[in-house]
Amino acid sequence: MFFNSIAFAVFLPIVFFLYWFVFNKTKSTQNALLIIASYYFYSCWDWRFLFLLVFSTFLDYYTGIQIEKGKTENSRKFWFWLSILVNLGFLGIFKYYNFFAASFSDLLNTAGLKSSPILLNVILPVGISFYTFHGLSYVIDIYYKRIKAEYNFVDYSLFVSYFPLLVAGPIERATHLLPQVKIKREFNFEKAKEGVFQIIWGLVKKVVIADTCATYANAIFDHYSSMNSLSLILGAVYFAFQIYGDFSGYSDIALGTSKLFGLDLLRNFNYPYFSRDIAEFWRRWHISLSSWFRDYLYIPLGGSKGGIWMKIRNTFIIFVVSGFWHGANWTYIAWGFINAVYFLPLLLRNSNRNNIDAIQLSWNFKSVKTITSILMTFLITCVAWVFFRAKTINDAILYLKHIVTNKNFSFQYLNNERYNYELLLMIGLFVLVEWNNRAKIEPFSGKNSMMKVAFAIMAIIAFGTFSDYKEFIYFQF
C-alpha cells in the first residue's frame, strides 16, 4: 500500500475514524487499533513477511527484558549479542547474501577459478532495514542502561511496527516515541490540521516533483551514452530533485499522518539542498539515519576524540557503512566513500561544525559567498548522486566522463522531454517555495493558506492522473 495510492486514501480515514470515535476510551485500545492497522498495512505488500516483523518484534522485546534482568555481565552480554546477531543475520540473509555470494564468485572467476554462486530466490522484505534499526537501538540503549526495558508488549510492538514509519522511516528512538505511546492521546484539531497540510505538501513533493523528474532522469540515465553534456547535467539535477522529493515527501506524509493520531515523529529532512558544506548537508539529510550511525557506530568507535588517523578511519567507516545500508550494490558503497572524501577536508580543518546557524541573506558580499557555497555543495552532491543512481560503478564513471568529454551544451530533446523548459521552471518555483518555507512550521502558513492548499491539491490530482504510478525509492532499502 503506497502513501500516494487510492487504497491509502481509503485506509487512512477509516483508521482515523475508528481511532478517535470507537477505540478512544483508553491508551490500550488506541494502541491495539494502531497495531492491527499497521499489520494490515504491512501485509498489503506481502503477508508472508509479516511473520518476520512479528518475530523481530518479539525477539527484541524478550531480549531487552532479559538484558535488564541479567544478574551477571555474561548473562547480559549473551542476550545482547543474541539480539544483535539474529537481527543482523536476518538483514544479511535477505539483503546482502546474494551480493556477497555474487561478488565472491566474481573474484574467484577473475583469479581463474570457475565458480557458480548459489543465490537465494527471495525478495527483500519491505522496511526490514528500518524496523531492524528500531529494534537494535532499543536493545543497545537497554544494554548501556540508557533506558529501561518495556514490559508492555502491545506498547513495544507499536513502537516497532507503527505504520507511518514502518516501511521507510524515520528511524525512531525508544526515548522519543515510546513515552508518547504509553499515554492516552487526546484529539487536537490544530495538530490534526497541521498533519493534513504536511501530508498534502508531501504529496506535492512526491507526485508533482519526484515522479515528474523521474520520467526525465530515467530516460537520460538509461541512455546516457547517446546524451550530450547538457542533457547529462540535467539528468543528474533531475535525479537530485527526484530523490529529494521522493524521500522528503514520504517523510512529510509519515510525520503528517502520525500527527493525525497525536504522535510526533522525528524530523528527517531540514532543507538539505540549502547546505553550505557537505557536513551541514548530512545534518539536514535523512537526519534519523545520520544521527543513528553517529550515536551507535561513530561515537562507540571513538568518534573524533582520538588522533587524526582515528578520526579519518571513523569517518570513512560511517559513510561507507551508510552507503552499504542503502543497498547491496558497489554503487552505494562508492557513493558513501565519495561523501567521506567530501567530508575529509572539513574534518582535517576542524570546520565541520562551522555552518550550524540559520542561513540569512542580504545585499552584501557575505551573501554572495553563502550562495556560492550552497551551489558548490549542491554540485558535488549531484556528482555523488550519479553513483547512487547508476546501475554499476562503470556506468557512473562513464556518465561523468561523457559530461566532460562530450562538450556539447546544446539543448537535446528526447521523445518524452517535450516539457523540459516547463519542468525546469517548476523545479525553480519549487526551490523558491522551499526557501520561503525553511523557517516555517508548516508550508501553508501565512496569507491565503487555503488557496495554497487548494492549488496544491489540484496539482496533485493533475500530475497524479497523467503520470506513471511510482513507488517510493526508499522502499527498496
Image (tube, rainbow, N blue to C red):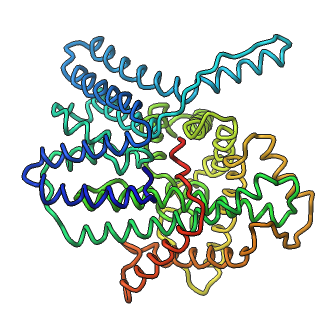
Residue 260 left/right relative to 314: left
Left or right: 4 with respect to 411?
left
Q: Find residue 469 and report its image quarter.
A: bottom right
- Using the image, determine if residue 181 lies above or below residue 407: above
Measuring from the top left, give residue 14's x and y in whole percent.
Answer: 25, 58
Q: Does residue 331 sit above or below 49 in this rendering?
A: below
Image location of residue 373, percent across then percent down: 65, 67
196, above or below 61, in the image? below
Residue sitting at x 27%, y 30% = 142
Give the image location of residue 423, x and y in percent.
67, 74
- Can you say whether 243 is above or below 334 in the image? below
Quarter occupied by residue 10: bottom left
The location of residue 15, given as percent across then percent down, is: 25, 55
Q: Is residue 308 visible?
A: no
Q: Is residue 215 left or right of residue 400?
A: left
193 vs 178, nearest the viewer: 193
Let me know if residue 391 appears in the view. yes
Residue at 25% across, 21% down: 67
Q: Front-most of 294 and 437?
A: 437
Tally of numbered discs: 0
Residues 115 and 317: in front is 115
Q: Is residue 115 left or right of residue 243?
A: right
